[in-house]
């Protein structure tokens, strides 16, 4: 199976404009993401999908592949599809790699590639066990409930499942909770299909596009990981990262 990695990289982030070009210890963020992704042994190519010619020029000058995409995509998923179609590359599956995680793990990419290679898997993503109450009740951290056969039952910004008979400070003692890690793999035919779906009520309620796929009957398989790399959503995140020693 031929699998490629696509990195959506928008310039106009509301909270951090120009984020892909932000410098981290002498390298741009997008350079670091591409370098990390290129270390994954399971993908045959890495492609940056951008909406800005400054990012396009920068990536090409570094010697990597990039393609211009529309400014109007509602999500990275839609941007991945346009990039794939414009690139002329053949792929049986695509891995959507977040452009704001400069230390993304190649091993996580390989784990997703292994999962999406299975005939029955249409969409795959990652989850990490939650061990602290702050993460559990932080509505900016998306939680996922996983079935016995490793499929996502539901994603939510709330802590799920709710425990009726236990106080909240005991929830982690009585159940397993998982944080969603936002890497996705899709069979190419399924990527085309989900990009044609209209936004759903569940998606709009939680502002989570993966709920649209579940609501339309798609299965999302989960690979559990012990790794969580820092994401840069704001300038403050970048400042913390620069001070962290990574």
Image (tube, rainbow, N blue to C red):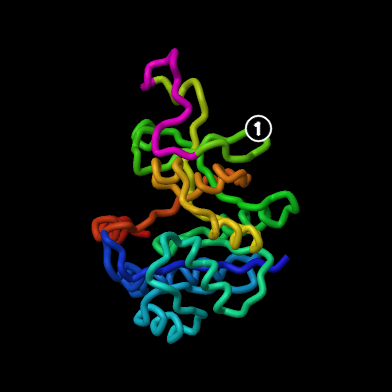
Q: Which residue is mark 1?
A: 148
Relative to 59, residue 168 above or below: above
Q: Which residues are magenta?
A: 155-169
Residue 1 within the magenta-colored segment of the rendering: no
Picture layout, residue 152 above or below residue 5? above
Within 10 angstroms of label 1, few (less than 14), some, or many (20 or more) residues? few
Give the camera-side residue of 201 and 101: 201
Horizontal arrangement in the rendering, residue 106 relative to residue 122 (left or right) = left
Q: Position of residue 94 (x, y in %)?
A: 60, 64
Q: Residue at x 43, y 23 (%)?
A: 171
Q: Write the residue at 42% across / 73% down.
A: 70
Q: Is residue 199 left or right of residue 45?
A: left
Tell me what residue is drawn at x 44 percent, y 47 percent: 208
The residue lying furthest to the bottom in this view is 61
Q: Residue 68: x and y, percent?
A: 45, 78
Q: Is residue 168 magenta?
A: yes
Quadrant that contains the C terminus: bottom left
Give the image location of residue 128, x and y in percent: 51, 42
Q: Quadrant of residue 90?
A: bottom right
Quadrant of the image occupied by residue 93: bottom right
Left or right side of 113 for 66 = left
């Amino acid at each position: 199976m031929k699998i490629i990695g696509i990195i959506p990289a928008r310039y106009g982030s509301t909270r951090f404009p120009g984020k892909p070009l932000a410098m981290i210890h002498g390298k741009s963020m997008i350079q670091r993401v591409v370098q990390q992704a290129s270390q994954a042994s399971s993908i045959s190519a890495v492609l940056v999908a951008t909406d800005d010619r400054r990012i396009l020029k920068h990536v090409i000058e570094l010697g990597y592949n990039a393609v211009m995409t529309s400014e109007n995509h509602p999500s990275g998923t839609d941007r991945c599809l346009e990039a794939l179609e414009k690139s002329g590359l053949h792929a049986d599956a695509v891995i959507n790699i977040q452009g704001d995680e400069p230390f993304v793990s190649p091993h996580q990419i390989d784990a997703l590639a292994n999962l999406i290679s299975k005939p029955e898997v249409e969409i795959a993503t990652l989850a990490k066990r939650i061990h602290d109450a702050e993460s559990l009740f932080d509505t900016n951290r998306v939680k996922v409930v996983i079935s016995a056969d490793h499929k996502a039952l539901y994603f939510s910004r709330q802590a799920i499942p709710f425990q009726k008979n236990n106080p909240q400070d005991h929830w982690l003692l009585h159940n397993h909770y998982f944080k969603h890690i936002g890497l996705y793999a899709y069979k190419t035919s399924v990527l085309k299909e989900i990009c044609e779906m209209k936004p759903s009520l569940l998606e709009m309620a939680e502002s989570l596009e993966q709920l649209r796929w579940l609501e339309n009957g798609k299965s999302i398989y989960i690979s559990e990981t012990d790794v969580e790399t820092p994401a840069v959503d704001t300038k403050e995140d970048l400042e913390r990262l620069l001070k962290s020693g990574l």
